Image: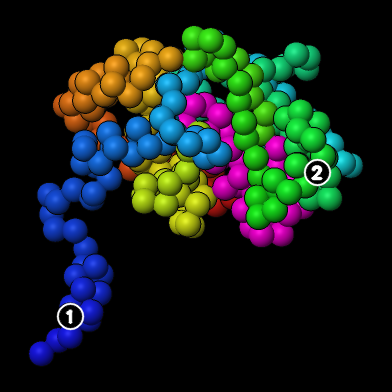
Amino acid sequence: MMRAAGLLLLLLALPLQAGQRPPWQDKAYIEKAFIEIAFKREYAAGIKRLNKWTRPVHWKIEYEGGVKASPLLETPILRHLDQLESVTGIVMVPVTRQPSLHIVLTRDRDFAAAIARHYLMPPDKARHFVRGVNCMGNYSTNRHGEIISATVIIPVDHAFKRGIYPACVVEELTQVMGLPNDADWVNPSIANDSSRRDLLSPLDYVMLRLLYQPELKPGMTVEQARPVIRRLLNRFEHLGILKMAPWLVKQAGLNKLSAEGQL
């Protein structure tokens, strides 16, 4: 007789039966995951209000610590910004002055100093803060809950050494769109730090698309947003978006770059 543990492993290894949905495609699961990622914060306790951009994002790549511009660094950023624009509808505009989104590429030795400078943090606190952190993203909002500025900081030598540069680009730029939290139970997702997910997942695609539906307003509480989320997910299911998300997410961004063998 097969041992219980062996039976469990066998069941987990079996493919989904025809017509059976993976857990993340369940509407209740998506609702729970969206509330966890959009209404909570990685470094702050409690439930917050919904945040999102409502105007075009003016972005700029800034090089610090002797990092030089190169297609190797810029191409993943450009491709992911293109995908974020296509999914959210928020226009991404490159600028040379006064960006609302600063994308700072620096070196590991200057990572803490960059955080202190860009996040207005005391140097001692910044040095303590970066321990165990691979890259950072943060945003600011107005009183209405609209995101008005954001800064992503990536120590590129550290990221390349660990093979996580694409993951840093995708996770941090996605989080500053208004999905700021991490949770180990949300899967598959770049918001799950315990996973090996480097690229935008179908669930991430759905959550981004959900966040930028006009019915969800910046500043909404969970109580205000929950019935709207359920109506939107019913619409998504009716339109086939949930079923098609694994295909849709691969049509742009780093997923497409990876499929083309260029990542």
Q: Quick check: is 162 in the magenta stretch?
A: yes
What is the x, y in percent for residue 249?
40, 38
What is the x, y in percent for residue 35?
35, 32
Q: Is residue 94 left or right of residue 32?
A: right
Residue placed most toward the observer, 248 or 219: 219
Label 1 belongs to which residue? 4
Category of crowding for the residue at label 1, using alpha-carbon neighbours closer than 10 angstroms: few (below 14), some (14–19), many (at least 20): few
What is the x, y in percent for residue 20?
14, 51
Q: Amino acid at mark 1?
A: Ala
Q: Is residue 242 left or right of residue 158?
A: left
Residue at coordinates 49% horizontally, 26% vertically from top-left? 178
94 relative to 120, above or below: above
Give the mark nearest the N terminus, 2 or 1: 1
Residue placed most toward the observer, 72 or 89: 89
Q: Amino acid at mark 2?
A: Asp
Residue at coordinates 62% horizontally, 53% vertically from top-left? 164
What is the x, y in percent for residue 188?
37, 49
Instruction: Say which of marks 2 and 1 sits in front.
Output: 2
Indicate the secondary structure of the residue bearing disc 2.
helix
Residue placed most toward the observer, 253 or 5: 5
Indicate the secondary structure of the residue bearing disc 1.
helix
Q: Which residues are magenta?
A: 153-179
Q: CA distance from mark 2 to mark 1?
A: 51 Å
Label 2 belongs to which residue? 124
Residue at coordinates 79% horizontally, 35% vertically from top-left? 122
Is the N terminus in the top left, top right, bottom left or bottom right quadrant? bottom left
